[in-house]
Amino acid sequence: MMDPRSIPTFVRSRSRTLGPKPALVLAAGGEDRTWTWADTWLHARTLALRLLDDGLAEGEPVLLWADDVPEALFAEVGVQAAGGYAIRLPAATDPGDVAAVSRATGARRLVAFGVPDAARADAGRVADLPGPVVLPPAPPAAPGQGPALDPWSDDPRLEERLSRQGPDSPALGLLPADRPDPSRGVLLSQRNLVGIGLAVAATLQAGEEDAWWVAAPWRSAFARTAGVAAAWLSGGELVLAAASDEPIETLWRARPSIVVAGSAVAESLARRAVSEVERGVGMSGRLACWAFHQALRPSRASLPGHLRSALADALGGAGLREVTGGRLSRMLIGDGVPGEEAPRHLQALGIRAWAATGNDRTAGVVTLQELPSTAGGATTVPGTRTRTAADGELWVEGVSAANPLHRGASTPPPAADGFRASGLRRTLDR
């Protein structure tokens, strides 16, 4: 049975019910690597038990020094399963900055992937950290080929930690992209990840058959709640791009059905879609190109209007997506307001598009608004209320507000009615 109290309990439940089903794919040209739900829990469980052996306390932060690789995602789940929370640091972070983050947040343990041994040792000497925790070799990448694991039984210590987790348990610390400054970071709770992730998955009508591609900076709360968490909570497959790959090329190879993207990627996708259509060959390609442009710029033509509309309807949606984006049918755009052309092009391709508003203090997503907007069309995260001030600024109240990562810091004080300013204006209404 699905257990959505926290991300670790959910992943463990999925490992029991969907064990051999792919959970994560690293798209790297012709050498894609796949991890199943059973593999995912195996990695997380291994690290969780190692941390428990090392004496990790409940609510204790752990520095996770790694780039956006599958092992880092598994490690996040493992730290949470052991009762702690991970603070993410890119592998290129200077050891002195790692030590500064350790002092500011009280993190005394370090998990590292892809970081030179000398740099890890340097950070440990500066911050008086214990030795870095290193995972054992990863199981084979082929689905279902990992070491045998009985998902129905677990270490009593791990069972106890998992049973005590709730919505307010800390889950993930994120630092700003420009520099690792904890005073500007946010701490996402399990309520942020699970509540927003389930809301996004439901809004996009996502299921186990969907493949998700998250094309937004992983240091943003938007990507972690509306992207990674939503993908896993839907039971779908999360597609990751190799670090050296061009994002749009990964999209065209992986053929996901759902994309969670920043506005810049959405605009690039729209331009690429137009290019793919215009390069279409054969009768189907020419018809698709014609229908695509008719959907964008209706004009007078030799065909009667009703016949032209019928052809456009017949070739639109799935037909146009087949020429340009394969399975892609839904897209969530965040990290800024997308340009006018991107939503129009996406809609012409039959792709349902939403815009996400919010910032890191509101966990990346306040509301999801379908494009074009309609009266009452906003879908609010469960347990959250929003209102728009006279100047158009969006205010939020409820579970989506994230906590400050820096010890002693506080979120902006709420107004008398409990709402807080998000710092954003709802500019997509039209």
Image: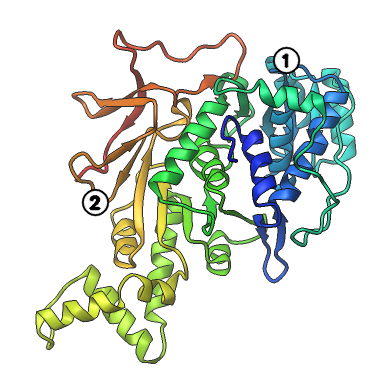
Q: In the rendered image, which quarter is residue 340 located in?
A: bottom left
User: Percent from the top left, x then y, of residue 258?
Assistant: 47, 56
User: Percent from the top left, x then y, of residue 102?
Assistant: 74, 20
Foreground: disc 2 or disc 1: 2
Mark with earlier residue (2, 1): 1
Looking at numbered disc 1 in the image, what kind of residue is underneath it? Answer: Gly
Residue denoted by label 1: 106
Q: Is residue 319 above or below residue 42?
A: below
SS at mark 1 in the image: loop
Picture residue at 60% right of the left edge, 29% below the top: 175
SS at mark 2 in the image: loop
Query: Does residue 141 appear to the left or right of 197 in the view shown?
Result: right
Picture residue at 21% right of the left edge, 39% below the top: 376
Residue 83 seen anywhere in this rendered image of the structure: no
User: Percent from the top left, x then y, of residue 422?
Assistant: 37, 25
Q: Is residue 87 above or below residue 268?
A: above
Query: Does residue 42 appear to the left or right of 203 in the view shown?
Result: right
Q: In the rendered image, which quarter is residue 298 located in?
A: bottom left
Residue lying furthest bottom in this view?
282
Residue denoted by label 2: 372
